[in-house]
Image (cartoon, rainbow, N blue to C red):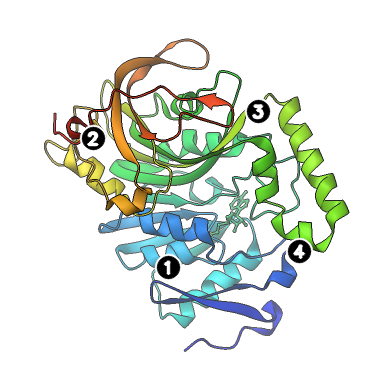
């Protein structure tokens, strides 16, 4: 039974997530700088994809209502939940109490600063990844230039991982004139001592992306809506943005001469399980010498999950970073049919051989 909200928090909305009762702010507080977001589609996607194996210590970066931390508390000895917003931590603590959860520690501060020097078996984050010229919503806008925040987090999080530990970070990132949606993320995670899977589940043109974050405003104030869309689209044009990508990066810490990077495009992603991917290619324990031919360890979910898409392998190759240097990681790329092109970006066309795509190599 959910206790009444402490008076200082005011009225809250309630929802159920996988058996947990989660309180968060009501929509009318959305324009307050300390708004606490509920469990929206992104929160639920991350919750579904989180690797649910036993962990001694889990870190939830940007905890908000605490939903990820509280779900992780079920398979962890202890969880550390970090947020810069003290109201979010108060709501998270309330949610812990009302669900009888006692193994979550709530720490105020910015990103990794409150956990300097600590190590975790699992780091999860649904950060404010929206790329925009605005910075008035701390739950949504990173406040940093373009995709700088998520790229920085991807570069720093590996240091927080125990050997064999995982990090899972939801991301938006910029696809520029080179039309390569993989290289930005590859550069961010390369030479960080981690194998990495990138699952890109959406790619949008600038105008569609701007529209997505202003849908409600269109009905409330059409003039303000048009002004915001124009401003955001001009911002993207000024910064050479061709398209904006949505995805999740899964890192696994593994000391090795060479780590691998496996990007794949899975529009319609629903229940793909990264843990299966990593464990499927593991030869012993957490050791994994070969890159996952995404193919092999990845169990295809029911066709409906992918809206009927079939997956093929486009081959593997050493890849170049944005700066043109050969990357230390090995890229194994897959793609999904359709699209041929999206957001002005043309995709390599397949040599359809769906059966070999699932073969173990
Ligand atoms: C998209 S919400 C995610 C909330 C929750 N983890 C979930 O999955 O529903 C992003 C969270 O990041 C927090 N945040 C923003 N800037 C931060 C910073 N500098 N350090 C830590 N957390 C931050 C926001 O306050 C917000 O709670």
Q: Which numbered mark, 2 or 4, is in the foreground of this view?
A: 2
Q: Quadrant of residue 197?
A: top left
Confirm or deny contact between disc 4 and disc 1 (CB under 8 A).
Answer: no
Label whose residue precedes the other's in the sequence (3 or 1): 1
Determine which of the numbered discs, if any, sits on residue 32 in the image.
4
Structural crowding at the residue carrying mark 2, measured as other residues with C-alpha within 10 Å and reported as few (<14), some (14–19) or many (≥20): many
Confirm or deny contact between disc 3 and disc 1 (CB under 8 A).
Answer: no
Label whose residue precedes the other's in the sequence (4 or 1): 4
Label whose residue precedes the other's in the sequence (1 or 2): 1
Of 160 and 136, the residue lying toward us: 136
**Where is residue 191 shown, x and y percent of the image?**
39, 24
Label whose residue precedes the other's in the sequence (3 or 4): 4
Mark 4 to mark 1: distance in Å? 25 Å
Confirm or deny contact between disc 2 and disc 4 (CB under 8 A).
Answer: no
Ligand 1 location (quadrant): bottom right
Structural crowding at the residue carrying mark 4, measured as other residues with C-alpha within 10 Å and reported as few (<14), some (14–19) or many (≥20): few
Of 255 and 26, the residue lying toward us: 26
Q: Residue at 55% of width from left, 46% of height from top?
A: 113
**Where is residue 193 shown, x and y percent of the image?**
34, 29
Determine which of the numbered discs, if any, sits on residue 295 in the image.
2
Q: Residue at 32% of width from left, 68% of height from top?
A: 74
Q: Residue at 16% of width from left, 38% of height from top?
A: 282
Mark 3 to mark 4: distance in Å? 29 Å
**Where is residue 229 shown, x and y percent of the image?**
77, 44
Structural crowding at the residue carrying mark 3, measured as other residues with C-alpha within 10 Å and reported as few (<14), some (14–19) or many (≥20): many
Confirm or deny contact between disc 3 and disc 4 (CB under 8 A).
Answer: no
- Residue identifier under label 1: 70
User: Is disc 2 placed on a helix, strand or loop?
Assistant: loop
Q: Residue furthest left?
A: 284
Residue 83 sits above or below residue 210 on the image: below
């Amino acid at each position: 039974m959910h206790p009444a909200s402490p008076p200082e928090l005011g009225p809250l909305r309630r929802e159920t997530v996988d058996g947990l009762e989660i309180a968060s702010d009501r929509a009318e507080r959305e324009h307050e700088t300390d708004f606490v977001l509920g469990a929206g589609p992104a929160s639920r996607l991350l919750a579904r994809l989180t690797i649910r194996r036993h962990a001694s210590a889990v870190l939830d970066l940007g905890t908000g209502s605490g939903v990820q931390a509280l779900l992780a508390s079920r398979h962890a000895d202890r969880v550390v939940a970090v947020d810069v917003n003290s109201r979010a931590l108060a709501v998270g603590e309330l949610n812990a109490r009302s669900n009888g959860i006692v193994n979550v520690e709530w720490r105020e501060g910015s990103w990794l600063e409150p956990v300097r020097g600590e190590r975790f078996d699992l780091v999860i984050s649904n950060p404010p990844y929206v790329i925009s010229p605005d910075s008035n919503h701390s739950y949504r806008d990173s406040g940093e230039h373009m995709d700088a925040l998520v790229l920085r987090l991807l570069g720093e999080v590996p240091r927080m991982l125990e050997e064999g530990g995982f990090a899972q970070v939801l991301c938006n990132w910029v696809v520029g004139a080179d039309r390569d949606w993989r290289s930005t993320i590859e550069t961010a995670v390369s030479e960080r001592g981690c194998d990495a899977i990138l699952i890109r589940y959406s790619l949008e043109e600038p105008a569609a992306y701007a529209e997505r974050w202003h849908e409600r405003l269109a009905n409330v104030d059409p003039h303000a809506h048009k002004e915001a869309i124009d401003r955001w689209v001009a911002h993207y044009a000024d910064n050479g943005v061709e398209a904006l990508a949505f995805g999740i990066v899964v890192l696994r810490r593994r000391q090795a001469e060479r780590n691998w990077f496996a990007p794949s495009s899975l529009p319609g992603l629903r229940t793909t399980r990264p843990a299966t991917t990593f464990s499927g290619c593991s030869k012993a324990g957490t050791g994994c010498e070969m890159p996952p031919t995404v193919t092999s360890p990845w169990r295809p979910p029911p066709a409906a999950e992918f809206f009927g898409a079939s997956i093929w392998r486009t081959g593997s190759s050493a890849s170049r970073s944005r700066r043109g240097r050969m990357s230390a990681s090995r890229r194994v790329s897959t793609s999904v049919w359709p699209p041929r092109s999206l957001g002005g970006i043309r995709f390599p066309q397949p040599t359809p051989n769906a059966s070999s795509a699932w073969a173990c190599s």
